């Protein structure tokens, strides 16, 4: 792989100001078991090269799975030709590469993510047996259980990055995850429960909780041990009362908070979005550069960081796809918006250095600014304490639906399940719970955060961005949190 990267760079013409190349070998294994038996087993393998070049200040990009000399020559011709053609219709770029991209990236190293047990060496029978046990336990909830899916996914990326500044970085990243979905119906209503994390049903497999780790992550999820409870809750939701429409105290579990954090503090703090790169497709952000350091995002107890260095986080790596080292970046400090996720180009435009957050979905895509491990720092409360000190409210768990405007301000989220809180005690289970709000107003009402013992990093392999679409694997570090005066209900 290293030879292919160096060969591609050796074919560049002289008018190329900068170029980087990534060679990626990706392996993905999916094992899916359903209520009526194995649903799908797949092993996909892909190898290719992506080349990005800059000519007269304009980017060109091309990719190929042909790694012979003819294929490499073709991809160079395509990328350079694209940049030259685009440059003809663009104003002359007078800025230097240092002005465009910041300090040069010259690192030469190797990095491998930790994995105690190689998931690709574990037998298929062992994987199917564990998932089948989870399905069987979930099915004990009775005949109203209409569908059960339990799945595992494993990813391995072997990557080589090289650029014209002298960098050469080899990385191996292994990711493992598993999850469970139960759908119950009584003929009139349909309800679902997920574990350990919710993922849209449109995604086949890739359900549950993921980590940058080996197979050792799978037993830690305890799918068979939790499955009966998950199935029973799905059935119980069918006869649960509907969440009342009211303004009340809302306690949000860490699993649900992962999505709230993602949508209100993750995407808004991506520097390329703040600079207008997504405006025509996905919208803008309330976190404009001129508001940094002055915009109050939430209460003083709220601080959020992006940290790609966390061991085991799904958004962890050694170096991003521009060769910049993984790092920790403050986004919200003591309730105030202070920083961005960035790549080399967006950071340079802001007068900064890259936060190491540029990543591409495989070899056939160009790097974009993506979330890493987006982490809400813990407080000094706990979930039991939040419940005990709440006179009237609702506790919700696990995301079910979402809607948010293109500035990431006004939103409405739905949860799989809720419980009423009355006089410091959990009461009835509630179904069809939603909550609405405006980002800074909701977070300003946050008056309690769970402590470090309740802190969990949830790995979610389904963050969508870009055109063509790219899917990123990211982590969300969360604790339970309490918010005052929130509008909740079923509609």
Image (spheres, grey):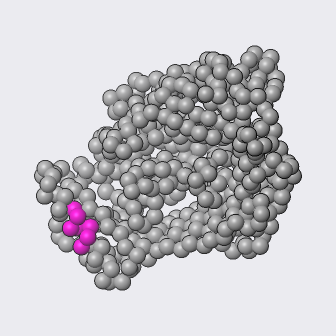
- Indicate the quadrant where residue 398 lies: top right
The number of discs equals 0
- Indicate the quadrant where residue 31 lies: bottom right
Q: Which quadrant: the C terminus?
A: top right
Residue 61 x, y percent position in the rendering: 30, 63
Q: Nearer the viewer, residue 77 or 43?
A: 43
Residue 465 x, y percent position in the rendering: 44, 50
Residue 277 x, y percent position in the rendering: 32, 44
Is residue 468 something that shows in the picture? Answer: yes
Residue at x 38%, y 39% (from the top left corner): 283
Check the image and report above or below for 485 versus 379. above
The secondary structure making up most of the magenta span is helix
Give the side of residue 27 with respect to residue 449, left or right.
left
| Residue 81 sits inside the magenta stretch | yes
Check the image and report above or below for 405 versus 352. above
| Residue 321 sits inside the magenta stretch | no
Give the side of residue 202 with respect to residue 322, left or right.
right
Check the image and report above or below for 70 versus 414. below
Q: Which quadrant: the N terminus?
A: bottom left
Residue found at the very far front of the displayed protein: 187
Magenta stretch?
77-83
Residue at x 39%, y 71% (from the top left corner): 49
Residue at x 21%, y 67% (from the top left corner): 81
Residue at x 39%, y 61% (from the top left corner): 365
Residue 46 x, y percent position in the rendering: 49, 73
Is residue 382 something that shows in the picture? Answer: no
């Amino acid at each position: 792989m290293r030879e292919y990267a160096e060969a591609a760079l050796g074919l560049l013409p002289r008018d190329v100001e900068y170029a980087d190349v990534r060679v990626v070998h990706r392996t993905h294994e999916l094992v899916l078991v359903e209520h009526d038996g194995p649903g799908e087993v797949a092993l996909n393998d892909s190898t290719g090269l992506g080349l990005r070049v800059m000519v007269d200040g304009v980017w060109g990009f091309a990719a190929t799975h042909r790694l012979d000399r003819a294929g490499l020559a073709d991809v160079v011709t395509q990328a350079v030709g694209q940049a030259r053609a685009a440059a003809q219709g663009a104003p002359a770029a007078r800025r230097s590469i240092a002005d465009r991209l910041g300090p040069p990236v010259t690192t030469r190293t190797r990095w491998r993510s930790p994995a105690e047990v190689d998931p690709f060496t574990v037998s298929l029978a062992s994987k199917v047996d564990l998932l089948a046990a989870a399905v069987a336990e979930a099915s004990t909830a009775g005949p109203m259980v209409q569908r059960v899916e339990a799945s595992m996914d494993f990813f391995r990326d072997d990557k080589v990055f090289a650029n014209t500044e002298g960098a050469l970085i080899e990385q191996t990243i292994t990711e493992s995850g598993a999850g469970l979905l139960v759908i119950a119906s009584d003929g009139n209503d349909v309800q679902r429960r997920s574990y350990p994390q919710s993922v849209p049903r449109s995604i086949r497999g890739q359900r549950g909780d993921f980590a940058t780790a080996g197979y050792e992550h799978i037993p830690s999820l305890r799918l068979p041990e939790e499955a009966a409870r998950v199935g029973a809750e799905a059935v119980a939701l069918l006869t649960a009362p509907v969440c009342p429409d009211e303004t009340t105290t809302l306690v949000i579990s860490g699993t649900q908070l992962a999505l709230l954090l993602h949508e209100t503090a993750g995407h808004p703090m991506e520097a390329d979005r703040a600079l207008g790169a997504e405006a025509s497709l996905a919208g803008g952000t309330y976190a404009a550069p001129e508001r940094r350091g002055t915009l109050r995002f939430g209460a003083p107890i709220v601080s959020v960081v992006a940290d790609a260095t966390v061991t085991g986080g799904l958004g962890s790596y050694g170096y991003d796809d521009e060769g910049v080292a993984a790092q920790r970046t403050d986004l919200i400090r003591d309730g105030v918006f202070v920083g961005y996720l960035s790549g080399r180009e967006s950071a340079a435009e802001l007068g900064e250095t890259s936060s190491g957050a540029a990543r591409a979905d495989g070899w056939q895509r160009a790097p974009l600014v993506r979330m890493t491990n987006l982490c809400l720092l813990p407080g000094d409360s706990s979930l039991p304490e939040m419940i005990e000190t709440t006179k009237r409210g609702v506790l919700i768990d696990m995301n079910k639906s979402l809607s948010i405007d293109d500035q990431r301000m006004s939103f409405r989220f739905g949860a799989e399940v809720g419980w009423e809180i009355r006089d410091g005690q959990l009461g009835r289970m509630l179904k069809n719970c939603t909550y609405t709000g405006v980002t800074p107003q909701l977070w300003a009402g946050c008056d309690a955060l769970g402590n470090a013992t309740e802190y969990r990093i949830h790995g979610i392999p389904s963050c969508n961005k870009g055109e063509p679409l790219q899917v990123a694997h990211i982590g969300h570090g969360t604790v339970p949190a309490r918010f005052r005066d929130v509008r909740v209900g079923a509609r």
